[in-house]
Image (cartoon, helix red, strand yellow):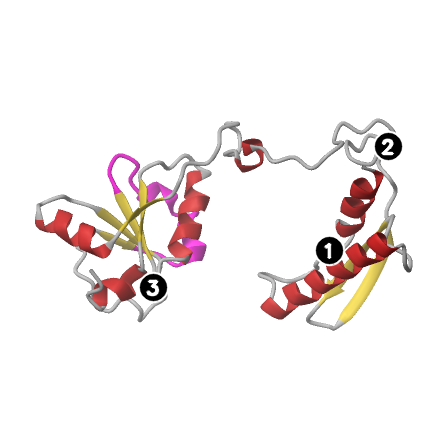
Amino acid sequence: MTFFRRFVASILCVAVLNLGSPLVAQAGVIGTLQAVEAVKLALGLGKPLFGKILFFDALKGLFETIDVSKNPKCPLCGPNPSITAPVDTEGFCATPGTGSPRSEIRTIGVAELKRRIEAGEKFFFLDIQSPGETGGLPFPETLRLSKSEVLRRMPEIPRDRAVIVLCRIGIQSREIIRELQDFGFTNLINLEGGTISWINGIF
């Protein structure tokens, strides 16, 4: 258990300093540093980053460490820890302010969507593709927003009817659904395969 506390404390000392979203290579650097810390602790080699935070500025290619004071009330490494073993609980995935787990992401395939549209069912579409990616999709009630605009323009997204969220291949739309679920949306459906599947007729 002592090793577990020391391992987590050391891994948490590796941090990223970036402007905007991290680069893929930047994540690789941090992952490598965390792996090195784990090996050092497991083998008892070197000097782990206890009591320090390591900052990495990828734009300037600089590393910097700062000393931090230990929190005597820390539930993991304090003198009276309440966290004594790794845990797996739904509480970590709770919606902020509700204490309840996030809902599963509902999905719909292009064949099912096409069938339901032809049967007269009305959907609202939230299209988060970049300009030029849409390809003239035949969805009349569509709100087209960039990912960065979605949260700011949430009032324009209905909550009382099914909303199909779509992007080019169906990955970014899942991310947006997760973000909107944190604000209480329960009516969002992800288009599997995105607009590529629709355009290519992958039914």
Residue 8: give x, y in percent of width and height: 76, 45
Q: Which residues are magenta?
A: 144-162
> Which amino acid, by three-letter code, is at mark 3?
Arg
Q: CA distance from mark 2 to mark 3?
A: 49 Å
Circle 3 sits in a helix, a strand or a loop, which is it? Answer: loop
Mark 2 vs 3, N-terminal side = 2
Mark 1 vs 3, N-terminal side = 1
Q: CA distance from mark 1 to mark 3?
A: 32 Å
Q: Quadrant of residue 26?
A: bottom right
Give the labeled residue for mark 1. 15
Does residue 62 sit above or below 158 in this rendering?
below
Residue 129: give x, y in percent of width and height: 35, 62
Please state which of residues 176 and 7 is positioned toward the viewer in this rendering. Answer: 7
From the viewer's perspective, tell me whether residue 45 is left or right of residue 144.
Answer: right
> Which amino acid, by three-letter code, is at mark 1?
Ala
Circle 2 sits in a helix, a strand or a loop, which is it? Answer: loop
Q: Residues within 10 Å of mark 2 (few under 14, many from 20)?
A: few
Circle 1 sits in a helix, a strand or a loop, which is it? Answer: loop
From the viewer's perspective, tell me whether residue 77 is left or right of residue 35.
Answer: right
- Quarter of the N terminus within the rendering: top right
Question: Do the numbered discs 2 and 1 sit on residues whose CB atoms are within 8 Å?
Answer: no
Q: CA distance from mark 2 to mark 1?
A: 21 Å
User: Is 150 one of the magenta-colored residues?
Assistant: yes
**Residue at position x 41%, y 34% from top?**
184
> Which amino acid, by three-letter code, is at mark 2?
Pro
Give the labeled residue for mark 2. 72
Q: Residues within 10 Å of mark 1 (few under 14, many from 20)?
A: some
Give the labeled residue for mark 3. 168
- Quarter of the C terminus within the rendering: bottom left
